[in-house]
Amino acid sequence: MTGFIYRDGVLTADGVPVPELAEAVGTPFYCYSTEALAANWRAFAEALVPRGVDIFYAVKANSNQAVIATLAGLGAGADVVSVGEMHRALAAGVPPDRIVFSGVGKTEAELAAALEAGIAQINVESLPELDALSAVARRLGATATVAIRVNPDVDAKTHAKITTGRKENKFGIDLDHAAQAFRHARSLPALSPVGVAVHIGSQLTDLAPYRAAYARVAELVTALRGEGFAIDRIDLGGGLGITYRDEAPPALDAYADVISQTVGDLGCHLMVEPGRALVGNAGILVARTIYVKDGLQRSFLILDAAMNDLIRPTLYDAWHDIRLVAEPAPGTARRPYDVVGPVCETGDTFAVQRPLPPVAAGDLVALWSAGAYGAVMSSAYNTRPPAPEVLVADGRFAIVRKRPTLEEMLAAEMLPPWLSADRTKARASTG
């Protein structure tokens, strides 16, 4: 991965030795490479911008403000799916007119906040949402710029939990009902239905589903224009995959060709929303080995990172490459380990029977390709403080989200008055 290389036998991140980060920050921690973020952005921009395609970063992949600000500084807009993500994008310096608000369940309060912020576009996913948005916009004296997200019933050929473009999925309006939805939107006050949006899933490594979905969108746009709708924008979603193990994502030029060949002649403002493809391979999770436990049948590496820090292996059976921070000598023999965390769940497992060089207690390991859906999906399960996040650039580093102390975590909770009184009485009786 760009940004993460071994120098003199030690893994470095943008020139910073990872052991130095571990000493300064403590483990586990996430580390993001500015060099990798910039390289990923340039690859997208060089392939798509000359084709007239605008790029909006899907914030849900990694919503750290430093990551958003890095990509925004390079030219990215932001695709958000909650009012919280919208505020993160604004705080990170993304202009309101470079923000698109997606998501299947926006509340009226969120719709109002988006309109008050003056964001570029709201992607609507149901008739009830159209009604709600119209009412909110009318109350605020605003006109909402709307793209209606359609469900093209295309199999993205990805994991079942991250496919979003089939009829049985909760997202979007069935393509057969799309024209009716646009007619309904036109009948409502304070709405300007000018766009079509589509997103069929995440971690796609085959361009055929995109071609099928975009062709159906093109047919819809042509039909809508025949009814007098001034469709001037198409949001093509995101979802391009990355290499975790042996996947072979398509070249970005080939992806751009699919866009040009399907919707490129419609004269629309085209948008894409990459997330994982921009940040996934720009981050690692660094952990320290607590114990090496040799059983009768298996050997376990017990790390100080756990499923609360990186849930993808537990949730999706996802593969993350695991590498020692100290580079093994060439030809070092490997043996299988189950790589696990300390959480009280059998599912707290990063890898099963993974061949690795010999590992000892105290050794640092890096879980590769952890920049997307890692820290952003973390929790405090087992009252484990979530891992901090670090951004590196040109031999420098900064903590961009600190690890909360146990005191800070406990201070966020409050006992009700009756339990506080009971605790005071109990202390007094034992004093």
Image: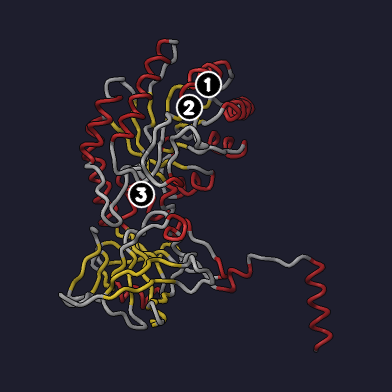
The amino acid pointed to by label 1 is: Ala
Disc number at residue 148? 2
Determine crowd level at label 2: few under 14, some 14-19, many 20+ residues with C-alpha closer than 10 A. Answer: many
Determine crowd level at label 3: few under 14, some 14-19, many 20+ residues with C-alpha closer than 10 A. Answer: many
Q: How many marks?
A: 3
Up-down relation of residue 69 to residue 10 (above or below): above
Quarter of the image with the N terminus in it: bottom left
For residue 169, side relative to residue 339 (left or right): right
The reply to whether callout 2 and callout 1 are in contact (CB within 8 Å) is: yes
Determine crowd level at label 1: few under 14, some 14-19, many 20+ residues with C-alpha closer than 10 A. Answer: many
Mark 1–mark 3 Cα distance, whole angstroms, equals 31 Å
Q: Residue furthest bottom?
A: 431
Q: Position of residue 194 (x, y in %)?
A: 44, 22
Residue found 37% across the figure and 65% down from its top: 285
Up-down relation of residue 356 to residue 50 (above or below): below
Q: Is there any visible trace of residue 117 in the rendered image?
A: no
Q: Position of residue 109 (x, y in %)?
A: 62, 39
Q: Secondary structure at mark 1?
A: helix
Disc number at residue 276? 3
Q: Position of residue 129 (x, y in %)?
A: 58, 30
Q: Is there any visible trace of residue 27 in the rendered image?
A: yes
Q: Secondary structure at mark 2?
A: strand
The amino acid pointed to by label 3 is: Arg
Mark 2–mark 3 Cα distance, whole angstroms, equals 24 Å
